[in-house]
Image: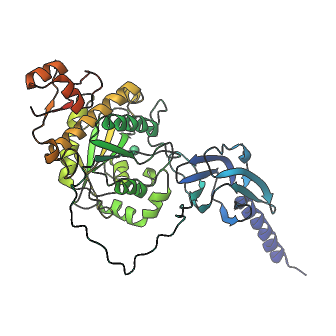
Amino acid sequence: MMNLNAIRHFLLLIILTALSLQVQASSSINNLRIWPAPDHTRLVFDLTGPVEHRVFSLENPKRLVIDISNVRLNTLLEDANLTSTPISRLRSAKRDKTGLRVVLDLAQEINPRSFLLKPNQQYGHRLVVDLVLAEQQPRVNQPVAKSVPVKKTVVQAPRAQRQIVIAIDPGHGGEDPGAIGPMGTREKHVVWGISKELARIIELDPAFKTVLTRTGDYYVGLRQRVNVARKARADLFVSIHADAYRLPQPQGSSVYVLSDRGASSESARWLADSENRADLIGGVEGFLTLGDKDETLVGVLVDLSMIATLSDSLKVGSKVLKNLGQVNRLHKNKVEEAGFLVLKSPDMPSMLIEAGFISNPQEEKRLKDLAYQRKLAQQIANAIKDYFLENPPPNTLLSKEQTAGSSSYIIRRGDTLSDIARRKGVDISELRKINSLSNDIIQVGQSLRIPST
Ligand SMILES: [Zn+2]
């Protein structure tokens, strides 16, 4: 016969079991967001709490199965937009008593990776499933030259002159909106607008070409951003952001370069601990706390995960800051150094531009205006071109042997193209040609190349 105490324990056990089941089953899927990018597609399940999950592939036909335990579905997953993704169909069904199975029919070979994310400023618990497109294998294997001696070319062809490559990095993207202004303007959209304009303006000069670290609205890991620049052998890396602060007053543009003087230990540790996490999370900034440091630095420390040739970065950064001062207030009138030890160095000057404070209502209004974005981009482009005219990398279209005799001239208020041509004793059509101008519109602060006479 059971004594009273045993019964009490037994009842308690039942209650606890029921409670724990309830706790486990209380997570729900409220939404599914899909972010297609050129090399992967990201699925983000918005959850009310953490879940257990399992992801595996099936063949014939190719499918990816996502099993989630103890979860309720509060949305119709089948409504998700699958355009530009490798998913041809998405189905979901209840599995066991409390689980859910999601099946993706795949039109392409992918490698899955998945992880859970804790809540940040913008989102709650999330389950992220990335479908990384499998690398295209070359069809024909190149025979490996094992013992064939390499013939040395005796005749030296003249070195081809190359274009100067500017890597432009529009911050954030995809499920990471960056900072959000009081009117709801998202940093990722503002920096995308400025970056696209910047690329367009820079490419008007045939001596330059640009590469964008992201080409649409999706998140790119910090490492990957640097890799894009490195792969393109960029001569300069420019990351574009917009600042935010918890108070509405701060305003103005700033330019940051990396410091080689080492990290605040907190951020260094953070980087070391979570190198992978930074790559995985679309919205890392919320995780880093810097204690008494200016809040605005947080994004910079996280985003600029690369070392620079500091003096070059400072030089070009100062030019950019000075030019930005012509169209906007400056938040700080010196290029700032963000001090932390970073990943192994790509040898390229790098800077991060905070175009302005999206948290300042007036500045937010300007920042979302296309004409203003264009003005900022023009000033940044002028500064960059100016820097490379003065410091041309070897074997580029601007290097000394190429531009021997030509000089540069910065346009002042009141100048016209015909005036400059007359003063410098050159033909105006020549002036247009060497500067790839399609008309005679010039801007104060713009740098013109003057052909030798
Ligand atoms: Zn940012």
Q: Is residue 120 left or right of residue 321?
A: right
Residue 330 showing in the rendered view: no
**x%, y% of residue 41?**
58, 52
In the foreground, 19 or 403: 403
Task: Reply above or below: 432 against 81.
Answer: above
Snapshot quadrant of residue 344: bottom left
Snapshot quadrant of residue 212: top left
At a point 52% along the width and 67% down the height, the residue shown is 140
**x%, y% of residue 127?**
61, 56
Q: Is residue 196 left or right of residue 396?
A: right
In the foreground, 285 or 276: 276
In the rendered image, the quadrant that contains the N terminus is: bottom right
Image quadrant, ligand 1: top left
Q: Residue furthest right?
A: 1
**x%, y% of residue 340?**
28, 59
Task: Reply above or below: 350 against 413.
Answer: below
In the foreground, 413 or 222: 413
Residue 436 showing in the rendered view: yes
**x%, y% of residue 173?**
48, 44
At a point 35% along the width and 44% down the height, the residue shown is 210
Task: Reply above or below: 150 against 225.
Answer: below
At a point 40% along the width and 30% down the height, the residue shown is 364
At a point 76% along the width and 67% down the height, the residue shown is 17
Q: Colour scheme in the image?
A: rainbow
In the foreground, 294 or 34: 34
In the rendered image, the quadrant that contains the C terminus is: top left
